Image (spheres, grey):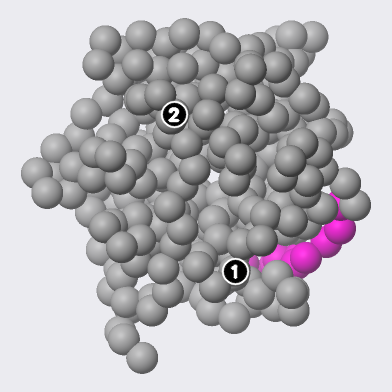
Amino acid sequence: MSSIKIECVITERYRIGESPVWDEREGMLVYVDITGQKVCRWNPNSNKIQSVSLEEPVGSVALRKSGSYAVAAGTTFAALNWEDKSVTPLARVDEDKPNNRFNDGKVDPAGRFCAGTMAQEFRPPAVGRNQGSLFTLYEDHSVVKHFDMVDVSNGLDWSLDHKTMYYIDSLTFRVDALDYDVKTGKTSNRRHVYKLQEDEGVPDGMCIDAEGKLWVACYNGGRVIRIDPQAGTVIQTVKLPVDKTTSCGFGGKDYSELYVTTACDGMDEAWSAGPQSGGIYKITGLGVKGIPPTAFAG
């Protein structure tokens, strides 16, 4: 076994760091600060961070096939042009729910951008229940709603054969699976894969590895767990030196580095949960690789 190494590679303290995506085109890690309302990218070679500020909380960022990025910000799917920092709306959701915002999102294997909503926090982690939904933005910029009555729409990813979508609604404390029709982007047959134990925290962002196992960042649990979705069991736990682990994604030139975002929002004493709360961590030596992210086709 190679030994696991955990290092804080980005010491900037983001309020809610989220949505780490490796951009192979630029050799950079792209991510968001949700309540800081910005999209950032970090160059591991120069250690430089660039950022673009948005007008609204930004839940997630995705690569875009035609260049730059797509974002789910406020209740709008939008295109972000990195060069001129412009944001172009593509579609709006939840127009009857002005208090909602997008949270986590990811591009499916066919190039559609899936992202879910939630009610804005009044005080973390108090959230209006059942206000969110899960949406897909298609290549033609039409939007389909999969289901509603979601508390905190969170991590999602797809099985290696693209037949299953894994999904987290955080306040259920579960990882769920749905049958996925990759031709149409439709979901059905939602079922439970794993329910977190009390000490594991709240399931947040998630990604799949090249062996088909799921990595879940556990908010307030200070860890990422590796789940075997077939067996419904945790097969590995990696603890981090901070509590509020929010999401994870593989990157680096061979996708063998797991990047973990964290938050410092909602901590009365920001230093109490470690001075590097809100930083971004790199975990190496896991002995497993991730899968390159798909770019949004629209």
Please indicate whether residue 239 sits to the left or right of residue 233 in the image: left
Residue 145 position (above or below residue 242) = above
Q: Which residues are magenta?
A: 190-200
Label 1, residues with CA under 10 Å away: few <14, some 14-19, many ≥20: some
One can see residue 105 in this view: no
* Badge 1 vs badge 2, beta-carbon distance below 8 Å: no
One can see residue 97 in this view: yes
Judge whether residue 133 is colored magenta.
Answer: no
Residue drawn at the location 31% of the way across and 63% of the way down: 254
What kind of element bears circle 2? Answer: loop
Residue drawn at the location 66% of the way across and 25% of the way down: 138
Q: Nearer the viewer, residue 195 or 215?
A: 215
Residue drawn at the location 75% of the way across and 67% of the way down: 194
The x and y percentages for residue 251 are 34, 55
Q: Which residue is mark 2?
A: 64
Q: Amino acid at mark 2?
A: Arg
Q: Which residue is mark 1?
A: 212
The x and y percentages for residue 88 are 47, 8
Q: Quadrant of the N terminus?
A: bottom left
Residue drawn at the location 30% of the way across and 13% of the way down: 85
Residue 33 position (above or below residue 76) = below
Please indicate whether residue 119 sits to the left or right of residue 60 in the image: right
The x and y percentages for residue 204 are 59, 50
The residues tagged by marks 1 and 2 sit, at their Cα atoms, a distance apart of 24 Å
